[in-house]
């Protein structure tokens, strides 16, 4: 299983040029945490603890070739951390001779990337473990080694797997540990299987109900030809984010309670939109620089706003605990530019496919996106150079 080691180090190379926090549970490029090595050193595999996914009503995973519309009870269980939803992938980088370490100047490329398999797995979390389920915003997130111990006591429910035909063997299904396997369809180079386990007789009623909810999973699947591995695969954003050309209409509030909508863009020729979360250290560390940038732009045709993405859930609305945390972060970092709480329109539009935080867009006075989104934190001078570049693009 040598290839899987390489999967864990995918985004470590990014940290040589930017700081970013990976978004929970996005497939299509793995994110990891590692310190940049000294010049001349090799970079070893490093990965942070996985966290639970935060599914929308429907999610599309372009490189897995599947759209999932979740049974309501199953989605709610994932959002409540009763079920742990985790992606998996087996990727080979054919230009690497040693999968345990990589040279500093190595970068993954589509022509040397081979996706052997991938998918999504659903694991029931026993009641005594549910308070420990790793999730976004968790104060004391367990280490990867701790996660590996914790996850062994979860109960595998179902596994949607995509397998490359050229590599497929029946043993791969048996190695998953699931009892039943159903071939759903095949598409291009890949086979799609739904593997599942029966619920045990001594399971709790909660567990039995959630296993029963899996009956609707197959009906909510749409399978298509997977998107070929391209530059978007490597963890910047999903293709859907890159293809968004307009912010659209929205109506929400700032952290201070001020009502705000898309009209804010009309104030300036260019608006920088910085999306962050309360659990993203890289986001918070750059806020003083963003505040200084905002002050420097006050007499120009550009402005800075931000969106604190984890303060709002499409199912439950505003999360008051995370809202208070965001307000404390804002106060501590001295930010005075508008910080928005997302609404459904922003969640389902601009923010839908973020793979890492902070992610930043530039838009004109009509809310039209200028250029591609930018992942990671940067210095004030680097942001100013980007603003000047995007301002020139907007003027064309």
Image (cartoon, rainbow, N blue to C red):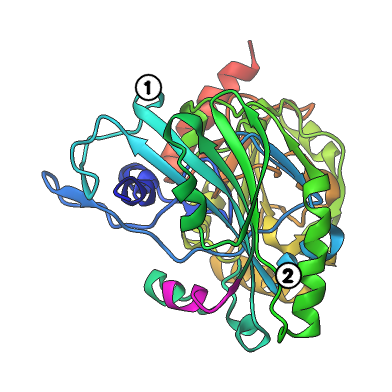
Q: Considering the numbered disc 2 on the image, is that residue within a helix, a strand or a loop?
A: helix
Q: Is residue 98 above or below residue 176?
A: above
Q: In this view, does 92 lie above or below 2?
A: above
Q: Is residue 152 magenta?
A: yes
Q: Earlier in the sequence, mark 2 or mark 1?
A: 1
Q: Is residue 1 left or right of residue 71?
A: left
Determine crowd level at label 2: few under 14, some 14-19, many 20+ residues with C-alpha closer than 10 A. Answer: some
Q: In this view, does 38 lie to the left or right of 15?
A: left
Q: Is residue 48 above or below residue 8?
A: below
Viewer-side residue, 34 vs 182: 182
Q: Name the residue under label 2.
A: 323
Residue 129: horizontal and vertical position, in percent?
60, 84
Residue lying at 36% horizontally and 49% vertically, measured from the top left? 4
In the rendering, which numbered label is found on residue 111? Answer: 1
- Magenta region: 148-155
Classify the position of the C terminus by image quarter.
top right
């Amino acid at each position: 299983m040598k290839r899987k080691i390489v999967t864990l180090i995918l985004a470590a190379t990014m940290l040589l040029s930017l700081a970013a926090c990976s978004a929970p549970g996005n497939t299509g490029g793995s994110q990891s945490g590692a310190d940049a090595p000294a010049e001349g050193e090799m970079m070893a595999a490093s990965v942070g603890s996985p966290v639970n996914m935060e599914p929308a009503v429907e999610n599309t995973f372009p490189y897995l070739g599947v759209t999932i519309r979740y049974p309501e009870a199953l989605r709610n269980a994932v959002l409540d951390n009763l079920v742990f939803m985790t992606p998996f992938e087996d990727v080979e980088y054919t230009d690497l001779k040693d999968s345990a370490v990589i040279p500093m100047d190595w970068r993954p490329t589509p022509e040397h990337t081979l996706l052997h398999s991938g998918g999504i797995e659903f694991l029931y979390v026993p009641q005594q473990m549910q308070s420990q389920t790793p999730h976004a915003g968790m104060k004391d997130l367990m280490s990867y080694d701790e996660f590996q111990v914790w996850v062994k006591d979860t109960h595998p429910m179902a596994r949607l797997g995509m397998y490359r035909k050229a590599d497929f063997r029946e043993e791969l299904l048996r190695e998953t540990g699931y009892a039943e396997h159903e071939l759903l369809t095949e598409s291009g180079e890949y086979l799609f299987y739904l593997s599942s386990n029966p619920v045990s007789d001594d399971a709790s009623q909660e567990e039995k109900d959630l296993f029963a909810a899996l009956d609707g999973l197959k009906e909510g699947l749409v399978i298509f030809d997977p998107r070929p591995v391209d530059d978007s695969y490597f963890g910047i954003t999903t293709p859907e984010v890159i293809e968004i050309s307009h912010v659209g209409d929205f109506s929400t509030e700032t952290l201070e309670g001020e009502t705000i909508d898309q009209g804010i863009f009309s104030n300036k020729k260019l608006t920088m939109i910085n999306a962050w979360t309360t659990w993203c250290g890289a986001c918070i560390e750059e806020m003083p620089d963003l505040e200084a940038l905002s002050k420097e732009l006050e007499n120009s045709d550009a402005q800075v706003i931000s969106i604190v993405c984890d303060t709002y859930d499409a199912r439950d609305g505003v999360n008051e605990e995370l809202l208070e945390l965001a307000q404390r972060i804002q106060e501590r970092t001295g930010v005075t530019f508008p910080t928005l709480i997302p609404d459904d329109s922003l969640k389902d539009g601009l923010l839908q496919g973020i793979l890492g935080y902070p992610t930043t867009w530039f838009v004109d006075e009509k809310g039209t996106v200028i250029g591609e989104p930018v992942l990671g934190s940067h210095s004030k001078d680097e942001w100013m150079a980007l603003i000047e570049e995007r301002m020139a693009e907007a003027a064309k």
